[in-house]
Structure formats: structure tokens, C-alpha cells
Amino acid sequence: MSEKKRTTFGLRLDQLADIFGVAVENQVPEESDCANNQLAETLRRRLTEVMPGNSLLLTAVSRIAASNLTEMLGKSLLQALSNPESTVGQLQALKEASKDLSTTAVSEQERAVATTIYHAAVACCLVHHDKKISQHSYDKLDESFTLLIEKSWMARELVELFSKARQICREKRNQK
């Protein structure tokens, strides 16, 4: 039996595509107003929770030198992400903590929130420091920011941040 038949069970490429398409459609739940409202509430709660109660921010702070710890105490994620004085190191730590959370989160909501915060830290660094702290290309970041902007559950403040960062990505891409 040939290798091709063993791995595709004799199906043609178009037949496999149809099967995978059906599987993906069944895996992605329809966005409902209720789910969007819950996600918006989860994101807002995560963004406004103040240190030290905010576990994501606390994890990020633990990655930063102790001298920067006091600067983060008493702040929320939203304050850290909207503050032009948040350092590149702080934003890098926040990005890494969000990345870790996105891989360990047990719910889709928590993964979506962690991914959002990851991109918000990247966007904040682009907007306030003109520095890219992601290995993703400017094209890929532009695409991600666009997708996040279009989410009905996205916090208004983050939509503004992502819009500014998306513009920077487009300018950087055009400079090449």
C-alpha cells in the first residue's frame, strides 16, 4: 500500500478539504450575544483588576526586576497598557505572562482574554516606544490587530490602542 493511501484513506484532496471544513465548522461555536457579553465582562474584569489581586499582572511583575515592582503596585492592566511610561521591560513581561496564560487557560474565554492582553502589550510597546516586542511580522501583527478591533466584545480602550498600533505596522511595512 502506498504512503499516500495510508494517510488519506484513498480520498482526494478536495474530499479531505470538505471533511476538514465540516469539522472546523462544528468546532467553532457561533458567536452569540450572551457569549460576547460574558467575554466582554471577563476582559473588563481582567483589565480593571488592581495589583496585587490581578494574578496576570502579578506574574508579569515577578518577571521584572524588583526595582520596577513598586511602579506596578496599585495599577490595573488597563492602566499599565495605556500608560506611555510603562517600560519596554514591563510590557515584555506582561506579554510573556499573557502568552503563558494563553497556553494554560482552561476556558476559551480566558484564552481569548490572554491573547488579547498579549497583543495589547505588543501594541502598547509599538505605540509608546516604537519597538516591536514580538517575532511576528508587521503584516501578521496588522492582521491580528484588525481581527481584535472587529470583535464585538473588545474594550473600547483596546480598540483605540490596536488601531494606533495597526497604523504603525502599516507604516513600517511600507518603509521596506
Image (cartoon, rainbow, N blue to C red):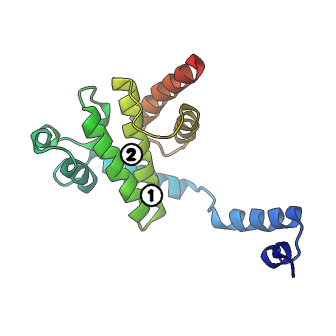
Q: Residue at x 55, y 53 (%)?
A: 33
- Above or below, 76 against 88 in this view is below
Residue at the front extreme, as displayed: 2
- Where residue 59 appears, as percent x and y from the top left, is 24, 54
Using a 10 Å C-alpha cutoff, classify the residue at mark 1 as few (fewer than 14 neighbours), some (14 to 19) or many (20 or more).
some
Q: Residue at x 47, y 52 (%)?
A: 37
Q: Which circle marks residue 111 in the picture? A: 1
Q: How many marks?
A: 2
Q: CA distance from mark 2 to mark 1?
A: 10 Å
Whether residue 78 is visible, yes or no, is no
Mark closer to the chain start, 2 or 1: 1
Depth check, front residue: 39 or 128: 128
Depth check, front residue: 64 or 113: 64
Q: Amino acid at mark 1?
A: Arg
* Dot 2 and dot 1 residues touching (CB under 8 Å): no
Depth check, front residue: 155 or 170: 170
Q: Which circle marks residue 117 in the picture? A: 2
Residue at the top extreme, as displayed: 175
Q: Amino acid at mark 2?
A: Ile
Depth check, front residue: 138 or 49: 138
Please give left or right for residue 28 compared with residue 96 in the image: right
- Where residue 150 appears, as percent x and y from the top left, is 57, 39
- Above or below, 44 against 156 in this view is below
Image quadrant assignment for residue 126: top left
From the image, which quarter does the N terminus lie in?
bottom right
Using a 10 Å C-alpha cutoff, classify the residue at mark 2 as few (fewer than 14 neighbours), some (14 to 19) or many (20 or more).
many
Q: Residue at x 18, y 48 (%)?
A: 51
Please give left or right for residue 161 compared with residue 149 in the image: left
From the image, which quarter does the C terminus lie in?
top right
Whether residue 30 is visible, yes or no, is yes
